[in-house]
Image (cartoon, helix red, strand yellow):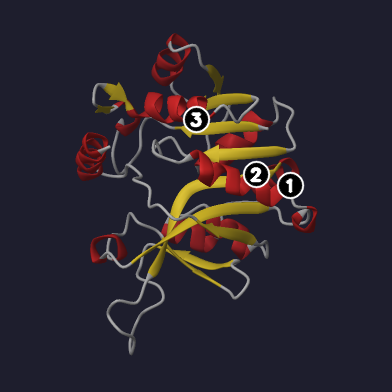
Amino acid sequence: MIAIIPARLNSKRFPRKLMEKINGVPLIVMTYQNLLSMKIFDEIIVATDSQEISNIIKNKGGQVFISKKEHFCGSDRVSEASNNFKSDIVINVQGDEPFVKPRSIKKIIDFFRDKQNKNIPVVSLIYETIDPEKINDENCVKVVTDNNNFAMYFSRSKIPFPRNIDKNFSFYIHVGVYGFLSQSISHFSSLKPSKLEKIEMLECIRFLENGQKIKMICIDTPTIGIDTPNDLLEAKKYLESI
């Protein structure tokens, strides 16, 4: 089993965020070292288009794949990298998710090891919240699921809209971690970026628009994804509290 961290340097919303430091450690290094500390994976690869990111990971003894193509999203980059490594399961952890817990990754692994789930191509993570800041933040992606916890839609908007519901109604926030069967990540990248995917700028919608299912697994602890400079401050406060 392998983990691949897609790492693009020039993010449009927050340029060079993966090189921003949290307590003196670049974000991409923190994400890589967090996965390394889990001792779960046969290999951990950082897939990037940046020589700067490549150099800093290699200096930490890490393995790097340099993309040979331009990619629309992180999972496309993961797909290209995965073609160079043999693994039945590919875990995609976004480079801006440095605080993912081992038990969250193990939930994905346990799901795929259950023979009843052998035909489910993609798994991802969500957590429940009533925090209005996260619910109203466009950088926190909301998810609605069906009765079997398959994703119905992802959006930066508040979904579902609680028109006649108590204000403490809880929402589900998407976490930037995916588990792919090897054939499903290849299939994903064979599909063109879809209409709603490009509108919302959310890669997971590509699967839904093409009739594919994504199983959502709820984790009990919210994570801190780094999308904005304010998230860096939140991350630093979190580290000081533990």
The residue lying at 70 percent from left, 53 percent from top is 121
- Label 2 sits on residue: 109
Q: Amino acid at mark 2?
A: Ile
Say what secondary structure mark 3 lies in. helix
Quadrant of the drawing holding the C terminus: top left
The reply to whether callout 3 and callout 1 are in contact (CB within 8 Å) is no
The residue lying at 29 percent from left, 35 percent from top is 15
Q: Amino acid at mark 1?
A: Arg
The reply to whether callout 1 and callout 2 are in contact (CB within 8 Å) is yes
User: How far across and down, in percent of the image, does residue 170 sit?
Assistant: 37, 72
Comes first in the chain, label 3 or label 1 = 3
Q: Nearer the viewer, residue 7 or 131?
A: 131
The reply to whether callout 3 and callout 2 are in contact (CB within 8 Å) is no
Q: Is residue 225 left or right of residue 237?
A: right
Classify 10 Å Cα crowding around label 2: few (below 14), some (14-19), many (20 and above): some
Q: Is residue 135 visible?
A: yes
User: How far across and down, in percent of the image, does residue 16 sit?
Assistant: 31, 30
Say what secondary structure mark 2 lies in. helix
The residue lying at 41 percent from left, 76 percent from top is 160
Answer with the quarter of the image where residue 8 lies.
Answer: top left
Residue 35 bears which disc, if any? 3
User: How far across and down, in percent of the image, does residue 187 sit?
Assistant: 71, 47
Answer with the quarter of the image where residue 238 lies.
Answer: top left
Q: Nearer the viewer, residue 26 or 106?
A: 106
Classify 10 Å Cα crowding around label 1: few (below 14), some (14-19), many (20 and above): few
Q: Is residue 131 left or right of residue 126?
A: left
Say what secondary structure mark 1 lies in. helix
Q: CA distance from mark 1 to mark 2?
A: 6 Å
Farthest residue toward the front?
242
Residue 113 bears which disc, if any? 1
User: How far across and down, in percent of the image, does residue 110 sit?
Assistant: 66, 47
Q: Amino acid at mark 3?
A: Leu
